[in-house]
Each structure stands twice: as C-alpha cells, then as structure tokens.
Amino acid sequence: MIVILKEHPDRVQLDNLMNWLNTQDVMVQPTVGEHQMILGLIGDTASIDDELISALDIVEAVKRVSEPYKKANRKFHPDDTIVRIDDHTSIGGGALTLIAGPCSVESEDQIIGIAEAVKKSGATILRGGAFKPRTSPYSFQGMGLEGIRLLLAAKEATGLPICTEIMDASQLPIFEDIDILQVGARNMQNFSLLKELGKTQKPVLLKRGMSATYQDWLMSAEYILAGGNPNVILCERGIRTFETYTRNTLDLSCIPALRALTHLPIVIDPSHASGRSALVPDLSKAATAAGADGLLIEVHNDPAHARCDGPQSLTPEVFDRLAKKLFAIRDVCGDDRRDVIIK
Ligand code: PEP
Ligand code: MN
C-alpha cells in the first residue's frame, strides 16, 4: 500500500500517522520526492483500512500495490534512482553512461590500452571479466585474481571505475576495490549471492536472466534492495527466443516498460544481445534514442584473436565513431523521458 501525502503536511498530524502505522505490523518506508512525500507500507496491509487513512487532512491518496516487488516499484519511489559510482560518475536520471571494455581481461597491455582508448571516446566506466561464467567448462574461464589485479592497474592508469562480474559471494573480499559488481545472466536468480550483495552498499549491475520476465528480474533486484543496498542497475542483455541468427534477441521494449514499473536505472548490452559486432552500432543507437541510462559495450583491440566473445566486440576505432553518434542522439532525444504517472 502507498500513502501519497499532500504538499507540506502538518508535522504533528504526520507524526501521529507514522506512530499509528508503526503499531500496525507493517514496515513504513518514507520517500521524499521533489514535490511530495510518499509512505510505502510493506508487509501484510490487508487489515489496514485505506478509507480511514484517505480521510486524513494530510493525505492526498491511498493506493494498494499489487506487484510483489515493492522497493523496486516506481509507485513507492517516483523519482529516478541515480546510482553514484564515484565522485565523477553516476548512472541513471537520463544521462547516457558508456561502459566499455573487453569481454575478458587478457594482459596488462591489453586492458590498459583498451581503457585509454575507450576513455578518450567518452566511456566513463571500464568493463572486463576476470571470472568468466562460460557455457563450456573447457572454455577460457578468465584470469581470476590476476584479472582483478590488472583491472585495478587499469583503474590506476586511467582513473576509470571498474565493472566486473562476481560469480559467488565468497569472492566479495577480493572485489573490495571494484566499483560495480556485475551479476551475470546465469546468476540472476542466485539468491544467496543476491542476499549477500544486499548487505553491501556496492553498485550492482544486475543482468537479466535469459528467460526472465520483467517481474522475475525486478524480484531479483528486490532481494538486493530488501537487504539494504539501494544501488541496483538493471542490464538487458538479450533474451532467448526461437531466432538463431542473433545470439539472443534484444528486448528494447524493456526501456519504456521498466521506466514505468521501476525507478532503477536501465543499461542495455547490445554485444551479448546480438553476438555480432556488425549489429552493435545500430542496436546501441536505438537503445540510446529509446532512453537507456547507459550502454555496456564490448570493445577489443584485436577481436579476431580475443579469448572470449571476439565476434561481438567492436574495435576501439568503431567504438569511437559510435560514441560520438550516441552522444548526439542523446542530445536530441534526452528530453523524451516520459513523466511517469502513478495510476
Ligand atoms: C559478460 O558481460 O561478459 C557476460 C558473460 O554477460 P552475460 O551474463 O550477459 O552473458
Ligand atoms: Mn562477453
């Protein structure tokens, strides 16, 4: 249930309402918006009389929320969440953030060279896998701890914050200096991992599972939020369909749909969605025009010899040309984000 208060509610009446709600066996989550304050009631609200609350002078409206995700729900939190990554970088709220880098870290020269190139093109976050969740146990599994060390060397050299995949909660101590913990598609419903990430304050990039609905995905986000970590970024990376030409099918509908359902930032990964570098520029442009908060793009200095995901990786030169177009598109379409109305 949500209680929407009138502007500038009387302090005493608000305290009385809060005190009464606190006796009702529900958790009260206040959200202070630009103009209005909202109280989100989480728990069993069946016995709470909404008409009684509606009748109060300070209350504008009371709504019952049927969706099972509460903290991720736009109704509880009308303003966009902006996830702060470091003093200069954030994701959400309409700016376009480019996250770029190789699928996997391969050497110090490779990761620092790519980091310098993508930074010059306007990327503000470096991606790179150290621990790789591969479909085959015989494929390259990533450089592991050494990969983390090289990512931190690239951060030191360029100042770019790092986004890399965590596969298991036991790895948390070695990810201490990593800026964004990526949860891969295959781990979207690894609930023990999500619960542990909820106990941290680290930004988490939560990829959509290959056959996850929006609700499944938002419920996974809810695990992290419910644990006390508000810094969740959603990342669409394509879903499984009957099409085999592309690696997956990019679901661009998720941008406007999730914009209405949730306040969390939405990043699009056209590289894993398509599996083909030739498709990545157009998908990136479409996602930018549709209002994505960021793009996660695989960039490799030598895609033909990449140890992982070469066919979908852009060269730094192609990425540079693309980035210029993306910022230009965002300038034209940036104001199109719709005001979301609580229905
Ligand atoms: C990746 O980002 O390299 C990756 C493995 O992604 P996903 O979990 O979307 O397959
Ligand atoms: Mn990859």
Image: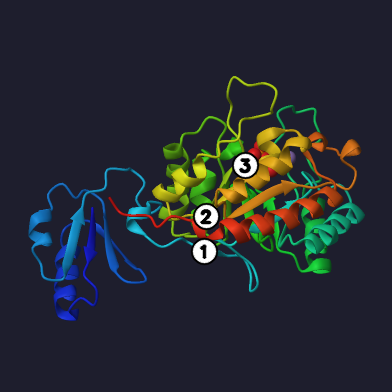
- Residue 29 locus on image (x, y percent): 31, 62
- Check residue 184 in the rendering and tell me which mark sits there, or answer none: 3
The numbered mark, 3 or 2, whose residue comes first in the sequence reads 3
Image height check: is 109 above or below 307?
Answer: below
Alpha carbon separation for disc pair 3 and 1: 21 Å
**Mark 3 vs mark 1: in front:** 1
Q: CB of residue at label 3: within 8 Å of ligand 1?
A: yes
What is the number of callouts on the image?
3
Q: Are marks 3 and 2 in contact (CB under 8 Å)?
A: no
Residue drawn at point x = 67 percent, y = 45 percent = 284
Residue placed under numbered mark 2 in the picture: 265
Mark 3 Cα shell of 10 Å, populated few (<14), some (14-19), many (≥20): many
In the picture provided, is 269 more to the left or to the right than 155?
A: left
In the picture provided, is 300 more to the left or to the right than 39?
A: right
- Residue 245 locus on image (x, y percent): 70, 23
The numbered mark, 3 or 1, whose residue comes first in the sequence reads 1
Residue type (three-letter) at the residue carrying disc 1: Ile
- Element marked by disc 3: loop
Task: Indicate the quadrant where residue 243 lies.
Answer: top right
Residue sitting at the far front:
332
Residue type (three-letter) at the residue carrying disc 3: Gly
Residue type (three-letter) at the residue carrying disc 2: Pro
Residue drawn at point x = 88 percent, y = 48 percent = 301
- Element marked by disc 2: loop
| Viewer can see residue 163 | yes
Residue sitting at the far bottom:
11
The numbered mark, 2 or 1, whose residue comes first in the sequence reads 1
Alpha carbon separation for disc pair 3 and 2: 17 Å
Mark 1 Cα shell of 10 Å, populated few (<14), some (14-19), many (≥20): many
Residue placed under numbered mark 1 in the picture: 82
Task: Indicate the quadrant where residue 59 lies.
Answer: bottom left
